[in-house]
Amino acid sequence: MYHATIVVTLRHSILDPQGKAVEHAIHSLSAGRVSNVRIGKQIQCAIDAPSRTEAAGIADTICKKLLANPVMEDYTVTIEERA
């Protein structure tokens, strides 16, 4: 059994209005040293696969077909073995 952590974020060339709103709110709290705030999503799931390679392939497939919009978003996948 493997545990996948998937992080989906907007590509850097895409404007992130939610990130800009959060950055503005941070600055209004007098924490002005924060910049380039980007908002994304994190998905965690268990994958029953015989190997780490197959688990990574399954995670990649669900990202491409369901979780991430390839035109606007990038994603990273981290696979950990679980007992």
Image (cartoon, helix red, strand yellow):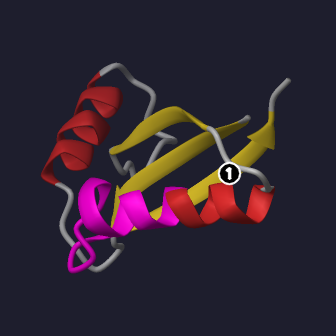
Q: Dot 1 corresponds to which residue?
A: 78
Choose top left, top right, bottom left or bottom right for residue 12: bottom left
Quadrant of res 61: bottom left
What kind of element bears circle 1?
A: strand
Residue 30 location (% of width, % of height): 39, 24
> Image quadrant for the N terminus?
top right
Would residue 36 be visible to someone looking at this image? no
Q: Is residue 67 above or below residue 2?
A: below
Q: Locate the C terminus and report the quarter of the image it occupies.
A: top right
Q: Residue at x 58, y 67 (%)?
A: 57
So how many labels did they put on this image? 1
Q: Can residue 66 be seen in this view?
A: yes
Task: Report the magenta stretch's main SS.
Answer: helix
Residue 15, placed above or below residue 8:
below
Magenta part of the chain: 59-73
Query: Considering only vertical position in the picture, is 56 above or below 70?
Result: above
Picture quadrant where residue 48 is located? top right
- The three-letter code of the residue at mark 1 reads Thr
- Give the camera-side residue of 17 and 41: 41
Residue 9, horizontal then vertical, whole percent: 37, 57
Q: Residue at x 18, y 43 (%)?
A: 18
The magenta stretch spans residue 71? yes
